[in-house]
Amino acid sequence: MEELISIVIPVYNVELYLSECLSSVKEQTYTNLDIIIVNDGSTDNSLEICQEFKKQDSRVTIVSQKNAGLSAARNAGIEIAKGRYITFLDSDDFISSDYIAYLYTMLTETDSDIAVCQREEVDENSQKIDQKTRRSAPMKVISGGENLMKTFLSENDIDTVAWGKLYATTLFSDVRYPVGKFHEDVYTTYQLIAKSKKLVVGFERNYFYRNRQQSISRSLFSLKHLDAIEAAKERAEFISKNYPSLLSIANASIIYATNMCVLRIAESSQLVISNVDDMLHDFQCNYRTYEKDFLRSNSSLQAKAFSLIAFCNVKLAIKLWNMIKKG
């Protein structure tokens, strides 16, 4: 008999994409599902769409709460999840019909705690953005605490995001997403990796990630993006205590997050922040502290070149980037 799997879907004002998302869940070839929809205070027709979906599928549970953000919505789903395994689906994305079956088969065949698949990026019209040939490779099994964490930190096959993975629900016994934070996965996924004895990576692209222009991850700079740096520093502190040989890799991610913030500032035509000089000073300190680790990382030459300029002078890096963008 198929084991029960919980799928948690946070919903907030996504009426344009929600039906496609929910249809992809209904069409799963793996049918023993505990479908949890968390309506996070939607003000559009999202709740009505969810309620209509529930009428058609008895496996659905709807939880409604005041708007508290993605972390709070995921946490609400985790709290009532009944499945032995759990996965997350963002409500503007969708999944292939064998998404659950694929992850479940890999996880159970290898006795892993987490199974991972790859993403396919689509635009707002659900059209593929990347037309490159799909990578064909056998699944990869990683075991052993330090080896697993090293793979997670240094390779691209295991993304930080919550979705695109099937987890043993027990991993969340004492782990929750940080409420009120953006880049919430950076605060959380490494903790789940650390609790895992084995992880399996598959290379089929069974999760369809919608690249929306208005999403927080694509927007110009806001103070919310500083959470990525904070999360990277928390992760580095954890690595320092538990996997000291991997500290250089963890420190490099602090510069990666700082680079992203500086680049967003450079591309923001109007930046109104009262303490901007203090913030740029903090960025400068990051470069001065962690630059050597970043230069030893597997980041691109362009990213390393930009970080070297910022190491010398963050404001100069911003000016030079503006000049390059203007042509």
Image (cartoon, rainbow, N blue to C red):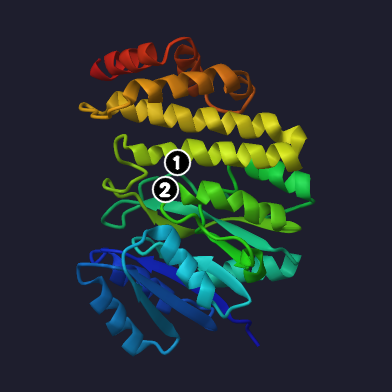
**Residue 65, horizontal then vertical, whole percent:** 34, 72
**Three-letter residue code for mark 2:** Phe
User: Residue drawn at (61%, 41%), measured in percent from left and top?
Assistant: 235
**Three-letter residue code for mark 1:** Asp
Say few, some or many: other residues with alpha carbon within 10 Å of mark 1 (under 14 / 14 to 19 / 20 or more). Answer: some
User: Residue drawn at (45%, 41%), measured in percent from left and top?
Assistant: 227
Q: Vertically, is 270 above or below 317?
A: below
**Residue 198, horizontal then vertical, whole percent:** 74, 58
Horizontal side of 3 relative to 119 (left or right) equals: right
Say few, some or many: other residues with alpha carbon within 10 Å of mark 2 (under 14 / 14 to 19 / 20 or more). Answer: many
**Residue 77, horizontal then vertical, whole percent:** 47, 71
Q: Vertically, is 239 above or below 264?
A: below
Are the residues tagged 2 and 1 within 8 Å (C-beta)? yes
| Residue 137 appears in view | no
The image quarter in which residue 156 lies:
top right
Q: Quadrant of the C terminus?
A: top left
Check disc 1 and report the residue beneath it.
227
**Residue 277, horizontal then vertical, whole percent:** 35, 20
User: Residue drawn at (58%, 41%), measured in percent from left and top?
Assistant: 234
Near-viewer residue (104 or 266): 266
Q: Vertically, is 319 above or below 258?
A: above
Check disc 2 and report the residue beneath it.
182
